[in-house]
Amino acid sequence: MNEKEMVVIENSDGSTMEVELVTYLISEDQMHTYLVYSKGEKSGALEDEVIYISKILKDGEILKLEEIVDENEWLAVQQLLKKIANG
Amino acid sequence: MDSMDNFGEAIYTVKSILFDILLEVERRLEDIDIQINRTEDNQKKESLKSLKETQETKRNEILKLTNKLMDNLNSLNSYDSNLSYIASDEEQASLVEETEDDFTNEVEDVSVTESVEVPVSSEEVVPDEVEVAPVAESVEVPVSSEEVVPDEVEVAPVAESVEVPVSSEEVVPNEVEVAPVAENVEVPVSSEINVPNATVVSVPSIPATETTVTDNNCSQQLSDLSIQLPIVDALKHEQGQITPVPNATQVNETILPQTNPQSSSYIKFIKNGNEVGKAILTTSEQFAKLKGSCGTQKALLNLKGSLTNNSSVGNTNNTLDGDVTEQQLINNGLLEPTHEELQKKIEIMLAQANELYRNGDAKAAQEMYNQISILNKQLQESTGIKK
């Protein structure tokens, strides 16, 4: 479990970056799935991990990422995270 | 210089002719005086006196013209001396000698005017008309035949014919002669100076400047790039910033070296838009729990079939396989068993409970039977719903 599993994110300008896969999230209504990933960033004296969450959209065989812009959706995603992280 | 010599000779010839005319006029004046003295007819005397005055006037005009002609000749000689600045010293010396000779001749010629005093024989006296036609042809001094006194000489045209050529030839040759000199001296020099300068300054300088600027820019850019990166890297190593709080660019740099050879099998996501992703801080414990749930979440997604990707990205294997099976999910309570699965599970559990009972482990067997009873109830309930 200590090994880092990487995924590739291709930005809109064509550049790609490899990020560390943290986990996936499934919304309560099973309608949406989310990618949780880390760029290896740490913040603060306690070196808290910075994690990023993006919504996964499946377009045929292509997996796309879309940023969460809706605040209610973001709150629901935070609840999913808390359930796992604090469980 | 030949044209100037010819011009000088022409002036000299005209001057000589004028002197000849002047000499003739003087001679006629003397004849008139003699006739005045001899005649007793008063009317004729008066006529002769009038003719004498006219001849004297003409003589004075001829003298004036001669003086003008001498002035022109002097200016021509001075022009020759001016030209000697360009000529060599020897040429200049010869020009000075020639000029001095000319002036000597002039002086001699002028002295000839004194010879006007030479007495003319009385036999020649008083020709009614003076044969000046040859003079007029060369000097254009027409003799007016309309005048009562046939000795009258029209000298004014001579002055015109003399002055105009002199002035014109004086000016034109000067301009013509000087112009080439000026061209030889100024124009080629200026052109040689300007053109080579323009060539030297503009042609080499402009490209050189552009090249220099371009090269400088390039070199600056290149040097900036080539210098900056090593400095940054050096600073990172010096400051021990191998795992700093990286920015987006540094994250890539720090992540890329960690890429393992299996990167070709990474799941690839294509990001839509340029929006900044939502981020949140987690403690190391929370981060570990989130990472620990990854297997289960993958299994759930696999069952859901939402992340199967056989890949547009080529080598990627986007099937969230996992190491987490359905049974594990069911056992973890994350996945509800289907009716068949539940029935199969009950059968397996019955077999395990019987085995435990046969082995003398009645307590464990009893607990297993209780679980089977619960599952059986669930199966009946699910069967009842289906029905």
Image: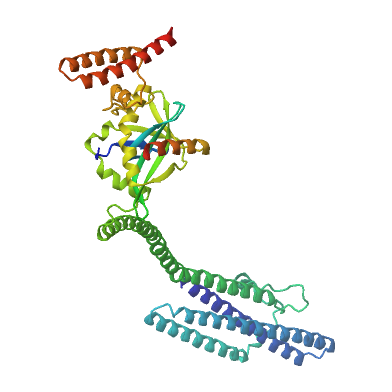
Residue closer to the observer: B264 or B133:
B264
Q: Nearer the viewer, residue B279 or B137?
A: B279
User: Looking at the image, is B369 positioned above or below residue B67?
Assistant: above
Name the residue at the top extreme.
Answer: B387
Between A12 and B43, the one nearer to me in the picture: A12
Residue A5 screen position, x and y as percent: 28, 37
Considering every residue shown, the one lying at the far right of the view is B43
Looking at the picture, how far across and down is residue B144, in whole percent? 73, 73
Task: Give the percent coordinates (x, y) of residue B5.
Answer: 48, 75
Q: Position of residue A73 (x, y in %)?
A: 50, 35
Residue B170 falls in image quadrant: bottom right
Quarter of the view holding residue B336: top left
Q: Residue at x 55, y 83 (%)?
A: B74
Where B58 falls versus B248 (above or below)? below
Q: Residue at x 26, y 28 (%)?
A: B323
On-image quarter of the N terminus of chain A: top left
Q: Nearer the viewer, residue B72 or B384?
A: B384
Q: Residue at x 39, y 29 (%)?
A: A63
Q: Quadrant of the C terminus of chain A?
A: top left
